[in-house]
Image: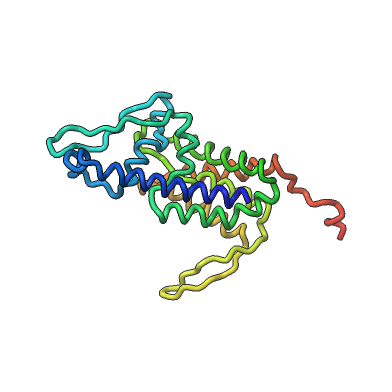
Amino acid sequence: MVVVIIILINFSVFIYQSYLSRQHLQNPLYASDLRPLAWPSSLEYFVLKDGLVPLEFVKQQNLEIPVGTDRWGHEVVYQRRVSPPLSLFFSLFMHGSWLHLLGNMLFLWIFGNNIEDRLGRIKFVFFYLLCGVGASLTHILFNMNSLIPVIGASGAVSGVMGAYLVLFPHARVRTLVFIFILVTTMDIPAAAFLVIWFIFQFLSSGGGSGIAWLAHVGGFILGFLLIKFLVSTKKPIIEILS
């Protein structure tokens, strides 16, 4: 139930930020002054205003974020709207594209329900948020001077995946497998899927793709460790004897 609510919140926030961003881009002032700025999507306005900025969090003060120049060569900056502590939480429910959103929510749906069942609703909410915050802090730790906003539920979802590795390592995960030009599905152990996923995130952390890989790594490790304190992973003696 909580997983469904979290998914609905993420979709609602994305639709809302899309609406506000389009409203901003239709502003005549924006059209006349900022049209030369080659932004990939209108969602960037919302991200720049409310996303988590590492340097801003380190300094604990709102900063002006430079976004480019207008047609007359003047620098264009955006004044941040959300305080650094709040952006740490708000950013967990913001996404930069439909693909970003759908990918995160798909993984949350696959792995989140079982973790919620084991933790209970209230514990799961705190676990999810704590993993997300921990993932963001991991990213900040390695990018303290960055002015690039960070958004997305990836860190929190990574924590859920880390917990899944502890509690359900032998569960089967149906996975798309690409064999040359053929695409098929295969059920593989969750442990194998999650370990491969984690290794990929770790090896990608040194790249400059614009993805906060270290946040994924931090969230996964935190979820992996935290779940051991919240849920007993020992099998009951009756189950062992049987």
Q: Is residue 22 above or below residue 239?
A: above
**Is there any visible trace of residue 232 in the rendered image?**
yes
- Residue at 44% of width from left, 44% of height from top? 94
Q: Horizontally, is 241 left or right of 105 in the view?
A: right
Instruction: Tell me where residue 54 appears, x and y as whole percent.
Output: 41, 33
Q: Horizontally, is 181 left or right of 239 in the view?
A: left
- Residue at 33% of width from left, 44% of height from top? 21
Q: Is residue 65 above or below residue 10?
A: above
- Residue at 77% of width from left, 48% of height from top? 234
The part of the image, by quadrant, that contains residue 225 is top right
Q: Horizontally, is 131 left or right of 56 in the view?
A: right
- Tell which of 2 and 113 is nearer to you: 2
- Tell which of 37 and 169 is nearer to you: 37
Image quarter (top left, top right, bottom left or bottom right) of the C terminus: bottom right
The part of the image, by quadrant, that contains residue 129 is top right
Q: Horizontally, is 67 left or right of 121 in the view?
A: left
Which residue lies most toward the left here? 72
The part of the image, by quadrant, that contains residue 239 is bottom right
**Colouring used for the render:** rainbow
Instruction: Tell me where residue 204 appears, x and y as whole percent.
Output: 43, 50
Instruction: Tell me where residue 171 appears, x and y as whole percent.
Output: 66, 61
- Tell which of 194 and 83 is nearer to you: 83
Instruction: Tell me where residue 185 appears, x and y as whole percent.
Output: 53, 71
